[in-house]
Amino acid sequence: MKGGDDDDVAPLEWKFSQVFGERTAGEEVQEVDIISAIEFDKTGDHLATGDRGGRVVLFERTDTKDHGGSRKDLERSDHTVSRHPEFRYKTEFQSHEPEFDYLKSLEIEEKINKIRWCQAANGALFLLSTNDKTIKFWKVQEKKIKKISEMNTEPSKASSSACLSPKTQLANGSPDRSKNNLINDLSLIGSIQALRLPVVTSHETSLVARCRRVYAHAHDYHINSISNNSDGETFISADDLRINLWNLEISSQSFNILDVKPTNMEDLTEVITAAEFHPTHCNTLAYSSSKGSIRLIDLRQSALCDSHAKLFEEQETPGSRSFFTEIIASVSDIKFARDGRYIVSRDYMTLKLWDINMDSGPVSTFQVHEHLRPRLCDLYENDSIFDKFECCPSGDGLRVATGSYSNLFRVFGCASGSTEATTLEASKNPMRRQVQTPARPSRSLSSITRAVRRGSESPSVDANGNSFDFTTKLLHLAWHPTENSIACAAANSFWKLREPSHFNLPSVISSTRLSFDVQQWPPHNL
């Protein structure tokens, strides 16, 4: 998405560093432990995962704290500092519980569909989580555990004294507060000078997650997306037919900004599949549909955004239509690049890059599942064709990533001059299934007039001749906002893969190579 020299667009080499709580061979995965959402915060210091059991688990980065210090201290230490990025378990909480809608006789699963981080404040973390029907706003903060110390008497003496000398009561049952009784009470603990007031002390801290607000009863259909606005005050939630605008401080009402529900449901031709706010323009958002189109809407045009500002769709090739055309064209996820200039979209077969200033077609199309086209009938029979794969752009805008089957995911270079198309596996040897892609001539994005397609050379088997396993799929992944680091979820395992790049340390400190973390969830020591 950006121009650069050859060093900027050189393919990355991904390495393994460590794994925590690795699952033993043959161990069964519980349905409630399967990760269903994953998200970095804006700083990259925290990572949140949600699972089908309704739990949200938070991880925090520790390497930035372990090697902290003043600039003067760093300049004084004339040696290489090893900084391996490492995330550790921070806390977890039960976000959603299974519910039952008695009016519609409908069971509501506790599965977490999406997680979005909000702006941190006063040392507290804030995030939104949602299941199919209800959105919750959470605050996670360290609380000091307070204890009372320096009591005037020991509990054993106080209890024994109370048994030996019971207080005198009046006829109506109330305690006798006469002077003689007060003197008798003081005699139990000694002189007045020996009195001491109890002191409240704080010894330990504990992380506490508290639900601040619940945004409910606004969606008749399953929520597929939530997205924070850049104004820090509002967010949107989207289901199959509606998009609602919420204020973070008001949970009792929302404003419906888009409704595609027809008067007669038999006239329904497409549904909303994903929605995302622009990263910097608070009045702009994009949403995708099951027909493969992406619409850009401007909230300044009208209160109800029935008409779109721009429409992005790829024209269908004549004679290529089949029974599966609309199914595989459905967009499962969209993401804005960090600068908001480009949109990354994922359908079942491809990953597309769109320029919001050019609505004639995608500027690049990356083939992810083209090798599966002859097997679409089998994929339809086992429902794999309806799998919803997510996508994510890198923080620098030079690459995009998306998941596949057999715990594989693909990384594509989208900068001018890049021919990068890497296949990686969520394992201790992520490069072992690497499929080499021949180099192709590069073209600048500014001069592209038709789509550039890469990655279609991938065969239906991996480099070792193993066929793809459709039961192990990598649906959810997130790219670190400032580094070439990807967190991905494969079943109940959370993996963090990192490219060994260089760190630019202050002054005379030399650069050091970095590795990536691989973590598995849930850890056995929890």
Image (cartoon, grey):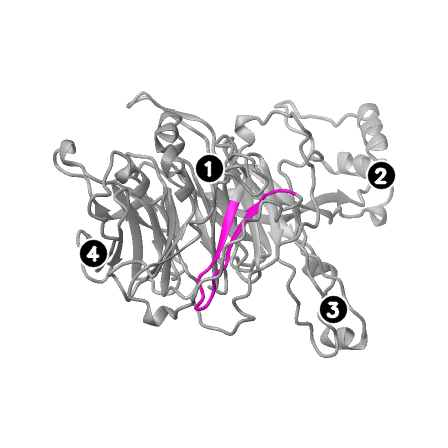
What secondary structure is marked by label 3?
A: loop
Of 218 and 502, the residue lying toward us: 502
First in sequence, mark 4 or 1: give its number. 1
Q: Foreground mark, 4 or 1?
A: 4
4 and 2 marks in contact (CB < 8 Å): no
Residue under label 2, please give it: 189
First in sequence, mark 4 or 3: give its number. 3
Residue under label 4, please give it: 308
Residue under label 3, please give it: 69
What secondary structure is marked by label 4?
A: loop
- Determine whether, in the image, residue 415 is placed left or right of residue 290: right
**Where does the magenta region start and end?**
409-427
Q: Is residue 248 visible?
A: no
Of 493 and 346, the residue lying toward us: 346
Q: Does the stretch in magenta take in 422?
A: yes
Residue under label 1, please give it: 112
Amino acid carrying mark 1 in the image: Ile
Q: Does the stretch in magenta take in 171?
A: no
